[in-house]
Amino acid sequence: MLKKFGFVAMMVGLLVLMTGCFNIEEPITKDSTGFWDSYLVYPLSWLIIYFADILNDSYGLSIIVVTILLRILILPLMIKQTKSAKAMQAIQPEMQKLREKYSAKDQKTQQKLQQEMMAMFQEHGVNPLAGCLPLFIQMPILLAFYHAIMRTGEIGNQPFLWFELGTPDPFFILPIVAGITTFIQQKMMMVQDNPQMRILLYVMPIMIFVFAIFFPTALTLYWVVGNIFMIAQTYFITGPNVGKAADGKSEEKKQPTKAKKGGKKK
């Protein structure tokens, strides 16, 4: 899990680094050259302008529509991630038994534990890294979205609700919503209750909140709408909490012990 957290931190850090590596001052047009501008940034810019024209020049609504379209585009990957989380939840009792069996911390025992874990994943058709793939796919889209926003002159000073799309939210409302929805999404996807999972559960929303304070609200709006879409998708595919059953089993495991202790006292 710590490796997954490191991967997430690396991807977010790479996103921040890359936002400064490209020339965001150069306007994006149909004449822009290069793979990045021609096939990622310009199509997003064109879509935002296209839907804004349809929606009475509302670039905020346009960004919401484009975000939903992008989410539908990567929906198969996201469904795969959700189902993978559900499959991971189903094998939690077996994973716990393996951890108890190979509880020693020496290198040989831990290697044996990893081998047994991988064999179990293969047996049940579970890919523990499946949850990272959607994030890997989303990061270039997020970066391209940032460029489309910053390099499309029509978007810059457009008002939407209480903010301007090209500048950070002055009241921090959208960053707070981004952090909360990130927390809810992760909580719904959490399949095991351990310290590492809890670290990621709380650190990721804080990271998103901090970045959202400085990024244009159009980008934060994209993230919030994407989170809401993911929350709804997870709810309809697996229910309100993928890990609920696993938590229930943990509680059931504790109950007989307590009853036994009570019997001894009598």
Image (tube, grey):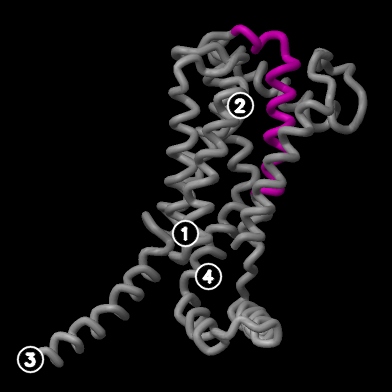
Left or right: 23 in relation to 84: right
Above or below, 152 relative to 12: above
Residue 65 seen in this snapshot: no
Measured Cα–Cα span from mark 1 to mark 2 = 26 Å
Q: Amino acid at mark 4?
A: Met
Q: Which residue is mark 1?
A: 190
Q: Which mark is residue 88?
A: 4
Q: Which residue is mark 3?
A: 266
The crowd level at tag 1 (other Cα within 10 Å; few <14, some 14-19, many 20+) is: many
Left or right: 157 in relation to 263: right
Q: Quadrant of the C terminus?
A: bottom left
Q: Amino acid at mark 1?
A: Met
Measured Cα–Cα span from mark 1 to mark 4 = 10 Å
Q: Which residue is mark 2?
A: 219
The crowd level at tag 3 (other Cα within 10 Å; few <14, some 14-19, many 20+) is: few
The numbered mark, 3 or 1, whose residue comes first in the sequence reads 1
Residue 212 is covered by the magenta coloring? no
